[in-house]
Image (cartoon, rainbow, N blue to C red):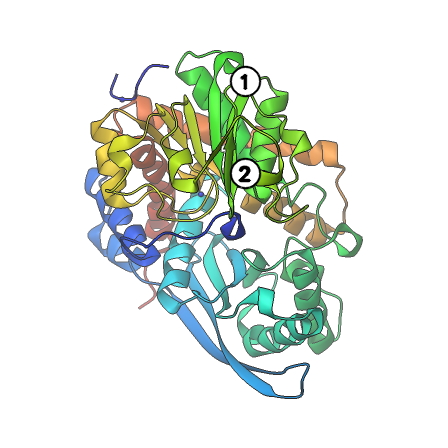
């Protein structure tokens, strides 16, 4: 594969590594770097450096043993110049205000790269969801929904699943919201079960988009997909679905991992025979392979393509010099730190960013929102066709920007996103 110098959640899939910088610091740094290359009004850049609003709420629940525990919840809303806020809800002990703001900024760019009529948001509760019973999780979700009810809605802010949440969680949000509004409003969230207005193909969409963009990038660099070795860190909903689809298309998936570690087989892994984290947690090491590897070792394997599809901040200053892959496609959100990106760029390693690669989730969420508003139900085949079309359109826009002077794929994606957002802000103007 030609090098680039010639030039993303599945948190449950691997344990987090110490962060070099927060999501907010990374998002702002990337914004400023991209804006420096573009003729964007500095006042608009300053606006985009800050969230529109951050809502912090107290969420008390009664535990199964009768005790009362109080948690803290957040909903960060970054920018809505192109439409309602859109973004996930995560339940994880490390949820913070700044993390939500940084992730909301990434959602803004992601929606703009895909040219969706949404802005970015992100929220969640600082809680270990694994320590909750099903009843406790339901009570927590319903109470949190009530606390943020005034700031969400199908034309205001539409949550979706993220770490520690799932379609059932979204069903509870929808029901709690609808009961208070005295009417059924399926469009308040996306990622719901299809039986109550969810879209076919939504859960697998982020992994599917990663596979599509990986396929296009492999072809862009003139390589035969059937002669391409791929390693995937994180065998959760993103990584497993990307690996299986690439496997089906003929790629040689040689390494996969979950929280317990990974397996490596240069002859290729039968991806469909290995349960994903959602299907059977921590099952990767139960699958026979010539060699086991740690999650850190997997990143440095001698492969053609690396897909970090688990957690953020795994490609850093400490290991970027040891990465052997010539192409990285970000499946997770923020897997590459700013310094890690600089080193990879200097070494000629191509990095296709998360805001393009894993945008399938928000894109199919948009399809779900349209279906809910219009009281329609699309077939899985139509969802796949529409997603393919949207991903290829976004790829073409970013590729064109790359070929006309953007030094990296990340710069190209940000140029597409920021140009669209800046144009919208310029046209709408600033409220006095």
Q: Position of residue 210 (x, y in %)?
A: 51, 34
Q: Which residue is mark 1?
A: 267
Q: Which residue is mark 2?
A: 239
Which picture quadrant has residue 303?
A: top left
Q: Nearer the viewer, residue 81 or 228?
A: 228
- How far separated are the C-alphas under marks 2 and 1? 19 Å
Q: Position of residue 16 (x, y in %)?
A: 41, 53
Q: Position of residue 310 (x, y in %)?
A: 48, 45
Which residue sits at x=44%, y=57%? 80
Q: Secondary structure at mark 1?
A: loop
Q: Secondary structure at mark 2?
A: helix
Q: Is residue 205 above or below residue 185?
A: above
Q: Nearer the viewer, residue 297 or 31?
A: 297
Badge 2 or badge 1: first in the primary sequence: 2
Labels 2 and 1 touching (C-beta < 8 A): no
- Residue 353's mark? none
């Amino acid at each position: 594969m030609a090098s680039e110098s010639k030039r993303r959640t599945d948190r449950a899939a691997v344990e987090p590594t110490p962060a070099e910088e927060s999501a907010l610091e990374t998002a702002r740094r990337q914004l400023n770097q991209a804006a420096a290359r573009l003729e964007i009004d500095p006042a608009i850049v300053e606006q985009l450096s800050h969230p529109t609003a951050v809502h912090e709420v107290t969420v008390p629940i009664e535990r199964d043993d009768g005790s009362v525990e109080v948690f803290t919840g957040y909903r960060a809303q970054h920018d809505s110049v192109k439409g309602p806020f859109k973004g996930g809800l995560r339940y994880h002990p490390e949820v913070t205000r700044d993390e939500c703001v940084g992730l909301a900024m990434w959602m803004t760019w992601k929606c703009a790269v895909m040219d969706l009529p949404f802005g970015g948001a992100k929220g969640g509760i600082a809680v270990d969801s694994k320590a909750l019973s099903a009843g406790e999780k339901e009570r927590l979700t319903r109470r949190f929904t009530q606390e943020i009810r005034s700031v969400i809605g199908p034309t205001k802010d539409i949550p979706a699943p993220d770490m520690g949440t799932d379609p059932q969680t979204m069903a509870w949000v929808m029901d709690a919201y609808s009961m208070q509004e005295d009417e059924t409003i399926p469009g308040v969230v996306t990622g719901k079960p299809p039986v109550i207005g969810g879209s076919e193909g939504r859960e697998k969409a982020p992994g599917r988009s990663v596979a599509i963009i990986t396929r296009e990038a492999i072809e862009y660099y003139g390589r035969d997909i059937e002669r391409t070795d791929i390693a995937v860190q994180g065998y959760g909903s993103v990584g497993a679905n990307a690996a299986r689809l690439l496997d089906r298309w003929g790629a040689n998936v040689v390494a996969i991992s979950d929280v317990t570690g990974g397996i490596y087989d240069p002859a290729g892994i039968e991806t469909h025979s290995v349960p994903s984290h959602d299907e059977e947690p921590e099952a990767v090491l139960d699958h026979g392979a010539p060699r086991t590897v740690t999650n850190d070792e997997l990143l440095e394997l001698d492969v053609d393509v690396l897909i970090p599809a688990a957690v953020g901040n795994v490609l850093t200053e400490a290991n970027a010099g040891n990465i052997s892959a010539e192409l990285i496609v970000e499946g997770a959100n923020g897997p590459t730190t700013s310094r890690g990106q600089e080193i990879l760029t200097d070494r000629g390693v191509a990095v296709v960013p998360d805001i393009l690669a894993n945008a399938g989730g928000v894109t199919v969420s948009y399809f779900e929102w349209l279906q809910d508003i219009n009281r329609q139900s699309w077939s899985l085949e139509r969802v796949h066709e529409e997603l393919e079309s949207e991903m290829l359109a976004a790829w073409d826009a970013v590729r064109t920007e790359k070929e006309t002077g953007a030094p990296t794929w990340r710069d190209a994606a940000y140029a597409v996103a920021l140009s669209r957002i800046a144009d919208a802000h310029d046209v709408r103007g600033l409220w006095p």
